[in-house]
């Protein structure tokens, strides 16, 4: 029997999330023909889960969950890209439970690191249970061997006795808890309420992407990250879109399959961090024919937007129908459910090259001129306008609103998509959320012709001799100087206060050959001196030394912590890097 993917045509009228809860949205989507389609690494269709089938299975499963846990109990679910995860997530919605999607072991730096993170999540969320694929049950049991949290396989959950009526969430209830992954301490559980999630879905589908009848989504993004969970599972369901999925691990092995799915099924909407587009360029072998002309919104989110890899992507795949104007930079974070701004559709990359020295010294994004030295230029990409019903303010560190063009400050946001706060974490909530409903995002940015430009994280800024050094400038310069022999880079400051700091740069290398290491060190050091002009202590480290968050971002604070603990090898000395206690910042 031939398995066919769910169609693009809904069979019902398109509705842009006027629904007060997720279950209301699924009740409507189930009247149509669309749904989720799951593919393997080579693009072969494995499973089809229509919204009609998902609703039926979720309701049936919820009848067992109601008797299993009290209302609003938290349930950890291993967020595999699978029909089972989708069914269990929505079963929790129908059962009045609060799912907490959990990252997978491959994402958090090895089994030991994963188990520690899992223990912290289970503690802070007070999980009633964890639901896991049978293949991951041994890891879960090992991680929680001294916890009372029961671990059930997906099959165990589906087999629970169906003895109760469903009790779906109401409009004033919670929706989920999503755990941040960048903290070096306990991960923070970001609360998604029914109101904040449905408001953001409406902003995404109606205002940001302006979803229409013939749209179809494609995604490889992980379901434990807000861009995958909200952007490509919940929001598509709330506007009845069909979605074609591939597993994130399959994407890293065969990224061109992502493009093949878009080509084969006329996908129109798909997002990736910049590195996803970059990976496609590196892995392209010119061994197939693609038609990417249907891809009208190639979204970029999840990290800093770097124009150079995106331009390379457009140059390579332009002859295959990809349009440069399809790029749709966006800005958001889990604390605003997902999205806060969208670039106008068709705009592409609105770039702004500034005088970096002026920005570092005066906090002004002043446009570079022909007289600005090349090494003092820095190009940013505008991330668009704030969603309707929301407000963004750029503020200085004294909380004054900055209204001048190009004034760089803290990005603060207010609106219906903003989270109620962090679950059972009063201090973190009070630090980020105000009583008036404002969120201090922790990001820095400025206005460019009414569009938001994001420059980086405020906590990552390196203050050195009156200059504000963006660590990514150091990292990108290092990677560009030796791109074929080096991997990730991480920059941070150590030492005392103010001008006593030392700027350190760790660079992963794919070789241990002393001569090659010397060449890399010399080339990268020279590039840093030329492009950034600050003294940097460069150390070459083995591949895998960096710590990456579950969303694929560099966790600078955790890398610094690992470095200061002497747990990173210096390839040119072949010993753990030694830092005296007085150097710990």
Image (tube, grey):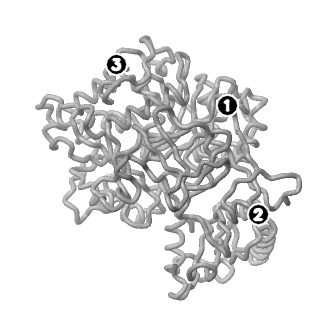
Location of mark 1 (residue): 326
Give whichever of discs 1 and 2 has the lower sequence position.
Answer: 1
Please tell me whether residue 561 is drawn above or below residue 117 in the rendered image. Answer: below
Q: Nearer the viewer, residue 148 or 338?
A: 338
Q: Nearer the viewer, residue 377 or 543?
A: 377
Q: Position of residue 317 (x, y in %)?
A: 74, 34
Residue 78 visible in the shown view: no
Q: Secondary structure at mark 2?
A: loop
Quadrant of the image for the N terminus? top left
Residue at horizontal 52 percent and vertical 77 percent from the top: 567
State the mark number for residue 482: 2
Location of mark 3 (residue): 28
Q: Position of residue 525 (x, y in %)?
A: 77, 73
Please tell me whether residue 281 is drawn above or below residue 21 in the rendered image. Answer: below
Q: Position of residue 434 (x, y in %)?
A: 38, 52
How far apart are the two marked residues, 1 and 2, measured between alpha carbons?
Answer: 30 Å
Residue 345 placement, left or right of 124: right
Q: Nearer the viewer, residue 286 or 205?
A: 205
Q: Secondary structure at mark 1?
A: helix
Residue at horizontal 58 percent and vertical 56 percent from the top: 409
How far apart are the two marked residues, 3 and 2, measured between alpha carbons?
Answer: 53 Å
Question: In the image as oriented, which residue stretches furthest toward the right?
Answer: 371
Q: Position of residue 99 (x, y in %)?
A: 30, 43
Q: Nearer the viewer, residue 378 or 367?
A: 367
Which image quarter: residue 295?
A: top right
Residue at horizontal 37 percent and vertical 57 percent from the top: 188
Residue 60 placement, left or right of 233: left
Question: In the image as oriented, which residue stretches furthest toward the left?
Answer: 163
Please tell me whether residue 142 is drawn above or below residue 131 in the rendered image. Answer: below
Give whichever of discs 3 and 2 has the lower sequence position.
Answer: 3
Label 1 packing within 10 angstroms: few (<14), some (14-19), many (20+): many
């Amino acid at each position: 029997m031939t398995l066919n993917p769910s169609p693009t045509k809904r069979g019902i009228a398109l509705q842009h999330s006027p629904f007060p809860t997720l279950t209301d949205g699924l009740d409507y989507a189930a009247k149509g023909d669309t749904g989720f389609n799951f593919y393997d690494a080579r693009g072969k269709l494995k499973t089809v889960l229509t919204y009609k089938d998902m609703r039926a299975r979720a309701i049936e499963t919820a009848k067992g969950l109601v008797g299993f846990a009290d209302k609003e109990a938290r349930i950890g679910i291993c967020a595999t890209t699978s029909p089972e995860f989708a069914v269990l997530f929505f079963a929790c919605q129908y059962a009045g439970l609060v799912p907490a999607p959990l990252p997978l072991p491959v994402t958090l730096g090895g089994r030991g690191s994963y188990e520690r993170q899992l223990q912290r999540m289970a503690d802070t969320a007070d999980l009633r249970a964890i639901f896991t694929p049978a293949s991951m049950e041994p890891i879960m049991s090992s991680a929680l061997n001294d916890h009372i949290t029961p671990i059930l396989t997906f099959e165990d959950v589906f087999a629970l006795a169906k003895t109760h009526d469903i009790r779906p969430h109401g409009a004033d209830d919670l929706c989920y808890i999503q755990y941040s992954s960048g903290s070096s301490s306990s991960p923070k559980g970001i609360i998604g309420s029914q109101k904040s999630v449905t408001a953001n879905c409406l902003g995404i589908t109606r205002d940001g992407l302006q979803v229409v009848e013939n749209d179809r989504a494609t995604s490889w993004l992980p379901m434990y990250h807000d861009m995958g969970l909200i952007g490509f599972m919940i929001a598509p369901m709330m506007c009845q879109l069909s979605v074609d999925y591939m597993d994130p691990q399959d994407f890293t092995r065969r990224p061109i399959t992502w493009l093949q799915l878009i080509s084969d099924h006329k996908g129109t909407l798909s997002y990736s961090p910049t590195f996803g587009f970059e990976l496609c360029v590196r892995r392209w072998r010119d061994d197939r024919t693609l038609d990417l002309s249907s891809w009208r919104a190639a979204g970029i989110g999840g990290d800093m937007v770097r124009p150079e890899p995106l331009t390379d992507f457009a140059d390579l795949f332009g002859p295959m129908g990809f349009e440069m104007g399809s790029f749709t930079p966006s800005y958001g974070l889990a604390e605003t459910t997902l999205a806060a701004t969208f670039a106008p559709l068709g705009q592409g990359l609105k770039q702004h090259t500034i005088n970096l020295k002026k920005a570092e010294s005066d906090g002004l994004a002043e446009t570079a001129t022909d007289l600005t030295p090349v090494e003092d230029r820095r190009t940013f990409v505008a991330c668009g306008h704030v969603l309707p019903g929301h407000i963004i303010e750029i503020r200085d560190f004294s909380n004054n609103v900055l209204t001048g063009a190009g004034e760089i400050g803290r990005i603060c946001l207010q609106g219906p998509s903003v989270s109620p706060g962090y679950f059972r974490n009063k201090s973190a909530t009070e630090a980020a959320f105000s009583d008036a409903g404002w969120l201090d995002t922790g990001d820095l940015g400025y206005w460019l012709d009414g569009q938001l430009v994001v420059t980086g994280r405020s906590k990552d800024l390196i203050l050195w001799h009156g200059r504000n050094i963006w660590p990514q400038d150091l990292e990108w310069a290092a990677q560009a100087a030796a791109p074929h022999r080096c991997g990730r880079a991480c920059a941070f400051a150590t030492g005392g206060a103010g001008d006593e700091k030392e700027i350190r740069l760790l660079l992963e290398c794919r070789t241990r050959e002393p001569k090659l290491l010397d060449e890399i060190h010399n080339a990268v050091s020279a590039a840093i001196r030329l492009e950034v002009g600050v003294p940097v202590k460069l150390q070459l480290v083995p591949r895998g030394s960096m710590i990456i968050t579950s969303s694929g971002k560099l966790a600078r604070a955790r890398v610094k912590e690992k470095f200061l603990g002497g747990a990173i090898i210096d390839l040119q000395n072949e010993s753990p890097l030694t830092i005296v206690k007085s150097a710990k910042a």
